Image (cartoon, rainbow, N blue to C red):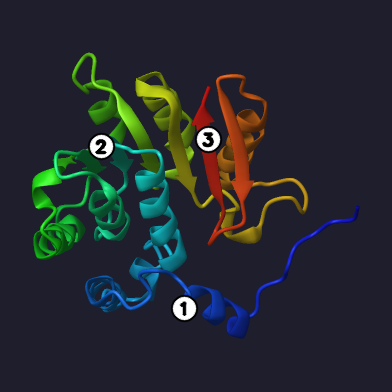
Amino acid sequence: MGIKYISLNDSLYSYLSGLRSDASDRLLEQLRAETAALGEEVSKCQISDEEGTLLGLLTAAIGAKSAIEVGTFTGYSSLCIARALPSDGRLICLDANREWTAIARKYWAKAGVQHRIELRLGAAIPALQQLEPGLTFDLAFIDANKTEYDTYYELILPRVRRNGLIILDNMLWGGRLGAGPVQEATGRAIDALNHKLAKDPRVEAVLLSVADGIQLCRKR
């Protein structure tokens, strides 16, 4: 069988994006609008609508009670994950930007999930190294400094339970991978990690063409 995929265009993307369970969620719409007001260069850091829905779906599907997020920005992904956790669930969010995460805090409170979320401000690698002994997670979402992705992954993997998920964002690097040698450090880091995950015996991994590419890894 030949290669099987569908090329997206604006109309088809609008069709699929509008057919999500939370497509009419006013709170998510408000958060997207407030983030967009920060300007295009900043707001492009926010995940896509359908990616947020997928994060919530996966969180609920595996019965996650404990989760960690590296890179919170204005809180869209954390909001989707936290809503899918049980009332006694816990999400630890790591981010270095106080201004952007202030927006996240506001929307966590509006959604009534602030009690499920603990924000730890500061650089991600030291924060991961300083996690409490014995702390484990059902799900991890990574969306921060791309050149540090491999380090995040290695620090988080031992803390993920068997059959837990690690999800990494922006793994197609704006569609620039696969066409030849990569010169930029960010692209090289993502490309190397994609190849590593495909062969890593500790996980079962698939690279999905959702948004800018999602690596979905199940810990064996």
Q: Which mark is residue 123?
A: 2
Residue 167 located left or right of residue 2: left
Work out whether 81 lies above or below 166: below
Answer with mark 1 or mark 3, whichever residue precedes in sequence: 1
Q: Secondary structure at mark 2?
A: loop
Q: Residue at x 29, y 76 (%)?
A: 29
Q: Position of residue 170 (x, y in %)?
A: 51, 52
CA distance for labels 2 and 1:
36 Å
- Residue wearing tag 1: 18
Q: Amino acid at mark 3?
A: Cys
Number of numbered discs = 3
How packed mark 3 is, by other alpha carbons closer than 10 Å (few <14, some 14-19, many 20 or more), is many
Residue 41 located left or right of residue 133: right
Q: Which mark is residue 217?
A: 3
Q: Secondary structure at mark 1?
A: loop
CA distance for labels 1 and 3:
27 Å
- Residues 129 and 158: in front is 158
- Residues 103 and 50: in front is 50
Q: Position of residue 61 (x, y in %)?
A: 41, 44
How packed mark 2 is, by other alpha carbons closer than 10 Å (few <14, some 14-19, many 20 or more), is some
Q: Residue at x 18, y 19 (%)?
A: 132
Q: Amino acid at mark 1?
A: Gly
Q: Position of residue 102 (x, y in %)?
A: 13, 59
Comparing labels 2 and 1, the label whose residue is closer to the camera: 1
Q: Amino acid at mark 2?
A: Ala
